[in-house]
Every structure is written in structure tokens, then in C-alpha cells.
Amino acid sequence: MSQNAILAEGGDVAGAIAQQTLARREAQYASEVRRLLDAALAVMRTCGTAASPRVADIVAAAGLSNDAFYRHFASKEALVAAILEDGSVRLSSYLDHQMAKASDPADKVRCFVEGVMSQAADDDVAATTRAVLWNGGTLSVHLGSSRSSPAASLAPLLREPFAQLGSPNPDADATLAAHAAVGMLSDLLSQHIRPTRADIDDVAEFCLAAVTSRPRRASTTKTLKATRRTRDERSRTS
């Protein structure tokens, strides 16, 4: 009778207990992954661009076992890819927060560029970013070319302000502008140079000029209709 009462009040007791167990395990695994990501980032920063960190060093820094590492990552390259993705998500969140402070679309673009370039302004941040990008440079060999670049993952933040500025193709323009900003950042990092105010302004104004100074492109549909109309008029007069 007591068992029936429990089932009546709580439904499937076995399923509920299993869900609790899974929840605890999920929290444990999430903690392990975060410890591995943080440890790998610290080891990368220490190694810099002189050497690639070993799995043994990362596991030791995280205070975990090899079994824990390979439970979540098939290889060290998979871990580096996760670090790059995690960094892109963090940077994207930071840029989104900074851009939200501006109401003018042009100012949003400037906030985006300044936020990207700020990754080379602080020595500690620059050293970490430099090491991660250096380690990530070998990923295409191991994981193929399907991995999104940092610029591609940040480009969606620029789509709306570019559309508001009258871009005829905000998706393409956002991608080009993001590549320009991230490309300049990579150059500064590789040369161990901090960006100046002039550097930031130059990149921002370049991105804005590419959108605001060129004429609108006619859509394919409008172009085809105009071509047909011209051809029909010529046929009637001939």
C-alpha cells in the first residue's frame, strides 16, 4: 500500500531516481570539462608559442585522470577546438554587452572593433590569446576545414548594425568586417604590439566605409526584370 501511495504521488519512482542520478553525473562531467578547459588554457599560456602542451600536463594541472580527459575529448586537438569555441563564446558575449551600450549602429560597429582589438591591449590577455591561436593553427590538419573561424563566429554581431546602415548584403559585409578586425588582431598579436587608438579607429572606419560609401547593389530579381524590359523594348522598335 505504501509503495502504491509513493507511485501515485510521485509517478515513476525509478525514473525519478534515475533522473536525479543523471543530473548529478551531468554536473560532475560539466565540472570536469571546465577544469580541463581552464587547466589547458593555463598550460598553453605557460608554453606560449614555443611548445604545444601535453595531455599529461593538462591532466595534472586539472587534478584529473587520463580516463577523465578521454571521457570528454577524443584527442588534444579536440580539446584545443573546444577552447577556441569557448573563447569565441566568451568574446562574443563581451562584444554583445559592449555594443548594447551604443544606440547608433555606427557606434556599435566601433564598439565591436574596439572589443576585438582589446584582446591585444593587455599583456596577459594577449599572451593567452596568442598561445590559443598558435595551438589552434594546427587544427585544420587534424579536424578538417569544417571548424568555424573566430571571425565567422563573431560576424553575426555586425549583421544588424550593417543592415541599419543600409548595407545591401549585411551578412557578407559583416563577415568581411569581422575578418578585417580579427586579422588585424592576429597581426598585432604575432608582432607583440599593443593597438593604438589610431589603429582601432582605422579598422573601424574602414569597416564603416565599406558599407556606407558604396552604392546599393540591385537585387538579382530587379536586374533580370530590367534586362528583360530592355530586351522587349528593343524587339518592338526593331
Image (cartoon, rainbow, N blue to C red):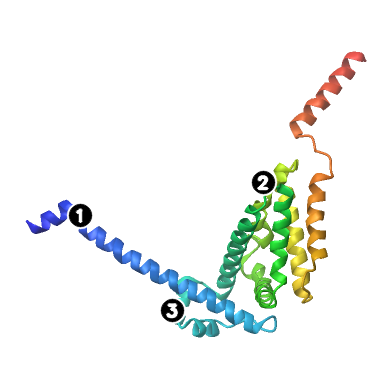
Residue 222 percent across, percent down from the top left: 77, 29
Disc number placed over residue 160 in the picture, else none = 2
Mark 2, secondary structure of its residue: helix
- The tag earlier along the polypeptide, 3 or 1, is 1
Q: Quadrant of the C terminus?
A: top right
Q: Which mark is residue 67?
A: 3
Tell me how far mark 3 sits from mark 2, CA to CA: 45 Å
Q: Which mark identifies residue 107?
A: none
Sequence-wise first label, 2 or 1: 1
Say which residue appears at 74% left-offset and 56% top-offset: 110
Q: Secondary structure under badge 3? A: helix
Q: Please determine whether, in this image, residue 109 is positioned above or below residue 69.
A: above
Q: What residue type is labelled 2?
A: Glu
**Residue that extends furthest to the right in the rendered view of this protein:** 238
User: Alpha carbon of mark 2 to alpha carbon of mark 1: how far?
Assistant: 48 Å
- Residue at x-position 69% and y-position 84%: 50
Q: Contact (CB < 8 A) between labels 2 and 1?
A: no
Query: Residue 41 at x, y = what percent?
Result: 58, 76
Task: State the separation of the CA atoms marked 3 and 1.
Answer: 37 Å
Foreground of the two, 11 or 98: 98
Q: Quadrant of residue 71?
A: bottom left
Placement of 224 over or under 113, stated as above or below? above
Residue 10 numbered tag: 1
Q: Earlier in the sequence, mark 3 or mark 2?
A: 3
How crowded is the residue under tag 3: few (<14 C-alpha within 10 Å), some, or many (20+)? few
* Residue depicted at x 81% and y 24%: 228
